[in-house]
Amino acid sequence: MSIGGNKQIFELLSESRELTWKNWGKKIDFHLPGMITLNGENGKYPAISITGESCELNCDHCGGKLLQSMIPATTPEELIERCIKVKKLGNQGCLISGGCLKNGRLPWESFIETISEIKRLTHLNISIHSGLIDLEMAKRFKDAGIDQVLIDVIGDEETFKTVYHTDVGIESIRNSLNALKQAEIPIAPHIVVGLNYGKLKGEWNALAMISELKPPILVIVALMPLAGTLMQDVLPPDPIDVAMIIARARMEMPDTLIALGCARPRGKISEKMEILAIDSGINRIALWSDAAIQRAKEYGLKVEFHKTCCSV
């Protein structure tokens, strides 16, 4: 695939790619999360939902659909039981997530001590998808031994309130990021490109919010129109827009690993995103295509495969 037609874009992607290779070497990691099957293989890092399929926000882009692929564990007892089973099945760790309450938070209060016990019993690597949090909870995450916190960063006030059906503003996201930073817990912020019904609105601001923290890893995902949601017929963002955000992120955060996450459209558009991401110097890609492997080979990249979330 050629970028073609825009010399500025080509030069930006080339500069970004060269910077990645300078700092990280000519290599790329492909990741297979635990809740997805690819070529008959499953990852070793499943996702567990502490709210089952329930989400009070019922966001326009998800509508709780993403929770359906997760293992339900709606009580502390179930969470311990599920995690012990995850360990016995030979998994490396798990992502603990769930649906949000109306205030944009998850019901961690009921589960935080349980997670601490799970770490003691299983020594699994534990990632959580936090939702909005305060400093007290961030410190409790740290004390519980949580290894990494994933958090969505939305940079546009209107998009946050309209798509997520929340009354709180994006300042609550900034406060959550700062709380995690202050608690000294590793974070993996996520930017959803095209969250505003497929159009870019606030992504650059989200990137600015994240770049202040210089996180160890940044995950870029793209709107995935899901059947049964209010965005099922929306056109996903142009792959070149995704690549531009990856490239700009690299220029602003040269020492941060950047991943193209699994939450993105499937099929040909995903292949284009993967190829352009590699052209941009991406470090990691979740759910790779043959076209992505071919592109990596064309650049002479060392390729490694992992059965974990791309943030791990």
Image: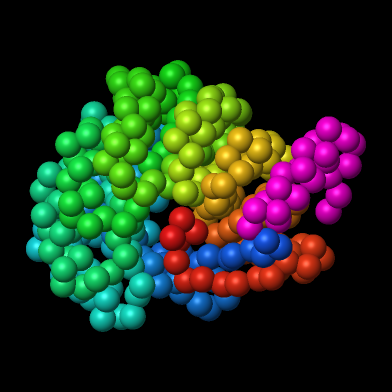
Tell me if residue 311 can be seen: yes
| Quadrant of the snapshot with the C terminus | bottom left
Considering depth in this image, is 214 or 281 the residue closer to the camera?
214
Q: How many marks?
A: 0
Q: Is residue 114 above or below residue 265?
A: below
Give the colour scheme of this rendering.
rainbow
Q: Quadrant of residue 245?
A: top right
Residue 199 picture quarter: top right
Q: Looking at the image, which residue is at 44% across and 35% down?
A: 213
For residue 198, side relative to residue 56 (left or right): right
- Image-based side of 33 in relation to 280, left or right: left
Q: Residue shown at 36%/72% (left/top)?
A: 92
What is the x, y in percent for residue 83? 22, 69
In this orientation, which residue lies closer to the viewer: 260 or 38? 260
Which residue is at 33% across, 80% downward?
A: 90
Q: Is residue 29 above or below residue 280?
A: below
Q: Read off the magenta span.
A: 1-24
Q: Is-magenta flag for residue 14?
A: yes
Q: Position of residue 19 (x, y in %)?
A: 71, 48
User: At which x and y percent is residue 24?
Assistant: 63, 57
Examine the residues drawn in magenta and state their main secondary structure: helix
Residue 242 visible in the snapshot: no
Query: Could you tell me residue 263's position as x and y percent?
Result: 51, 50
The magenta stretch spans residue 5:
yes
User: In the image shown, does 18 or 259 lie closer to the viewer?
Assistant: 18
* Left-right relation of 92 to 197: left
